[in-house]
Image (tube, rainbow, N blue to C red):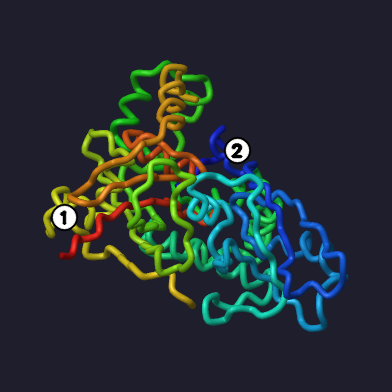
Amino acid sequence: MENKGEGTEAQKYIWEGAIPLQIHLHESEVTNLPAPPPAMILAPRIGYLPLLAQKVEPFFSNSLPPGVDTIWFEYNGLPLKWYIPTGVLFDLLCAEPERPWNLTVHFRGYPGNVLTPCDSEDSVKWSFINSFKEAAYIINGNCKNVMNMSQSDQLELWRSIMDGNLDSYLRISSKLKFGILVDDFSIQLNISSPKSPESTQNADGPAPAKTGRIPVRLYVRTINEDFDELEDAPVVDSWDRISYINRPVEIHGDGKCFTLYDAITKLLPEFFGEKLPPKDDVSKEEVEVEQRLSPEETNKSNTEQSGEMLNEGIVSCSVSDGTEIKLLRIQGIEPKMEIPFAWVVNNLMNPEHFLHICVYVKIQEPITI
């Protein structure tokens, strides 16, 4: 879903967002004393950890043992999936945000049994392009718009990600005509709201899509232990504790406000059994893949309301017997569940057009006697 021209305030916030990292060289790779001090770096939220290589390596090059450099990172002993955006990794693994985020970097001993190969920046680039194609297919039913991009447009698109240049990104991605997602409820709000000169001027432009299939990547962190404070959440020591769900959300224009809560009930039917739609309502073309991450501003009142929805996150949400959502986080934000999903999609999605949602789910273990 695309915003043409200048980005929204929320989009600018996301693209300018960065996570302070304190990066330590693993002790097994320190060849001289004293050990090098940690590197302090700001990592873009929408970026990927391997893209930090040119900034990180100079800090530790004089301390490395002989061999070929293959950079990878770990957090609390957990090798980090390089193809997951840095901001998503942070939201997923740090229930209580840790600033700076203490990571360990390696240049040797790549854990090929846990991480897929990442030889260079090109590996990250093509992973991004493939995700972009997948999103296009979900939205349009095909990925011809991405496949037919010129080499210069592909290069500029990728460079916009590397440089965090939102204007450049919007200029290129607008050519793909993904459209702006607006539900009927939001349209009614806009009709009843005072129109700005800009909105009047653009009234004859392309009509926004009232319905749509939204590419979503859901990361479900399952927790068996109970906790009241986020800082007490257990450490993730294996990717087996996290389910990766690649499941589109289909929105139908029925005059109602389709909320984030509505989207979550569709994304996690196993936790909202009573909310399951009839089988006839499920699109035959729906692509659903569930797997483990195993080895391998309209008017002022509306603006204020959106701000309130964003700033007040859920405490917990009981969804079925023995199960509750302890935390839901998108782009570092813990939004209210009643926020319009169209707003979430248009403002908080990542550059490859996927909306990444991190969910902490508490599951009651059965009592054995």
Q: Which residue is at 42% across, 17% downward?
A: 301
Residue 111 lies in what quarter of the image? bottom right
Place of residue 217 in the rendered image (x, y in percent of width and height, measured from the top left)? 41, 58
Using the image, determine if residue 318 lies above or below residue 145: above
Tell me if 227 is positioned left or right of 23 in this view.
left
Q: Which residue is mark 2?
A: 12
Residue drawn at x 46%, y 17% as measured from the top left:
300
Give the crowd class for mark 1: few <14, some 14-19, many >=20 residues within 10 Å: few
In the foreground, 311 or 367: 367
Q: Is residue 152 above or below residue 213?
A: below
Tell me: 16 left or right of 317.
right
Q: Is residue 260 left or right of residue 255?
A: right
The residue that appears at 61% across and 68% down in the rendered structure is 124
- Quarter of the image for the C terminus: give it: bottom left
Q: Give percent across and percent down for residue 177.
A: 48, 50
To which residue does mark 1 refer?
281
Residue 132 lies, with reference to residue 180, above or below; the image says: below
Kindly identify the amino acid type of the residue bearing the numbered disc 1.
Asp
Whole-percent x, y for residue 368 in the image: 18, 65
Asked where in the image residue 185 lies, by quadrant, the reply is top left
